[in-house]
Image (tube, rainbow, N blue to C red):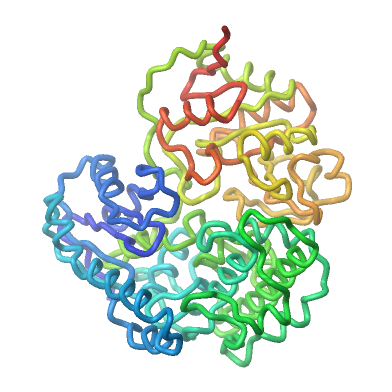
Amino acid sequence: MAPVPPRSGAVLGLHAFTHDSSAALCLGGRLAAFGEEERFTRVKGDPVFPERAIRFCLDSAGLKAGEVDQVVVPFRPRLGAAARLAYLARRPRAFLPRAADLARKGRSMEGLARDLASLGILAPVEFADHYAAHARAVFAASPFERAAVLVLDGVAERWTGALFRAIRRDGPTLEPLARFPFPHSLGLVYAAVTVHLGFAPNREEGKVLAMAALGDDRFVDAFGARCRIAGRNLIVDQALFDFAGEWTTRRFERILGPRRSPGGPFRPEHFALARALQATVERCGTELARQAVALSGCPDLCAAGGLALNPALNQAMAAQSGCAGFFAFPPGGDAGTAIGAALDPFADPSWSLPHPFFGSMPGAAGTDHPVLAERGAATERAAEMLAGGALVGVCRGRAEMGPRALGHRSILADPRRPEVKERLNRKVKRREEFQPFAPAALTARRPDLFPGMEASPFMLRAFPLPERAKDLIPAAIHADGTSRVQTVEPGDASGLAPLLEAFERRTGLPVLLNTSLNLRGEPLADTAADALRVFGEGGLDALLLDDRLLGRRTG
């Protein structure tokens, strides 16, 4: 029997108190609005109660707080607490502070009704399976009628990942096929190596992925032997990892090298460790994806969880799992579980994700920057500036979900110019020089420019490109010859096609470098005021703000 929708079909999904707080509003089983709290507070990964995101979702849909029928949270706070505490107890120095932190988060979760009541939301609050929320969100968003779903992340409740069979009719329905128990976790292993290499967990794993392309294979076998798949189980050698406090152990250092101090120099062994980690995660993830396809009997594969934001892993799973079709979506991490939660009581089986732009509009902001062009002329002038080597910011329409800029909160540049990458990394992003940038390209020209590459509108797969691509787009291809291409269709919601077409008329190349509109350590720009600050402080040459192209002040 198909699930019965709530009274008016207004369901609010909330993810909060761990990291990446978010809110999603579904009306009649369809996503209406999605907000990430970090976009409003400007604190990357903000874990607080998502008050601003909730207000945005309600305002966006024109709903009053009292019109919310149900609130669903994609986490069951008591489930798995004993296992987590038992793990912490084996590490006495970390036990008290970490146990207190777990208790605080649990109390916050269970006190959500009070927080919601302060906003006027008196609807009942339910707690749902975290991994089912991941799976429901990505499958409902996908174009598939039935699919295997693989979820891989750090830890939630008492698991670190899961396999499902998903069928769209009647819901959709989800059938669990396997779960991976804590502490055996590919997501926590990735976080541990991220810390070992001097970066912040749950925030800077992308830097480790970038490093992997520059590493040699000296540690691949040693690391791979400590993380493996045995039957349907993921096995992680716990002698190397301390997920309760220090992340990696002394034995890890003896085998795989000492820690890098944050801000310290990078050595060849650091890049080799990143390479070993990524190779191991790809091998294990692909084997689990292969099992998911085989066990489910479904030809297509959906991937979710924090590791589904790893484009190299996604490409490996898509190419080597035996799946016919592959789908991952922009808010694949924990923030996206709010969508799965909001779809939990009732999901319209005919709905799939039409585009990733469910965030807020830029709003108004006063500025004394000169207007270089308006409306249709702004596209042509921006293309002219880009062809001349300018960096152009874009802030228009509703913001994209997830961490990837897809044309509404972007910085664009000419990918033919190697010096563009250095300028972006050094002056705008202020980050390590080894981090790559990605291109946006017109889909129709894909066979000529990138033969064999599939459509990838969300920039979530790292494709191997032909050798000549290094000469065509040197600023938007990584050291290993791969690129996280965003494919663009004329008339799609990204709005990038007219600019790509105008750039092609001037250069012969329908490709632009596309990176996120933000400064170091910040989430994507959300409002016009955010965009203007990035424009000013980041040294961009122009900003396409709605339908106006703004230039830099002179004098």
Q: Residue furthest front?
A: 93
Q: Is 399 placed above or below 67 here? A: above
The x and y percentages for residue 353 are 45, 53
Task: Decide if residue 139 is on the left or right side of residue 114.
Answer: right
Q: Is 367 placed above or below 332 here? A: above
Quarter-wise, where is residue 284 in the image? bottom right
Q: Is 23 placed above or below 269 here? A: above
Which quadrant would the C terminus be assigned to in this image?
Answer: top right
Quarter-wise, where is residue 372 in the image? top right
Residue at 46% x, 37% y: name it. Answer: 525
Residue 342 visible (yes or no): yes
- Number of residue marks: 0
The x and y percentages for residue 352 are 44, 56
Residue at 48% x, 79% y: name it. Answer: 162
Q: 498 and 529: which one is in front?
A: 529
Residue 148 visible (yes or no): no
Residue at 44% x, 70% y: name it. Answer: 135
Q: Is 359 placed above or below 193 here? A: above
The x and y percentages for residue 271 are 75, 63
Residue at 32% x, 54% y: name it. Answer: 23
Q: 32 and 189: which one is in front?
A: 189
Quarter-wise, where is residue 461 in the image? bottom right
Q: 337 and 52: which one is in front?
A: 52
Task: Decide if residue 49 is on the left or right side of residue 6.
Answer: right
The x and y percentages for residue 88 are 41, 84
Which quadrant would the N terminus be assigned to in this image?
Answer: bottom left
Task: Decide if residue 202 is on the left or right side of residue 51.
Answer: right
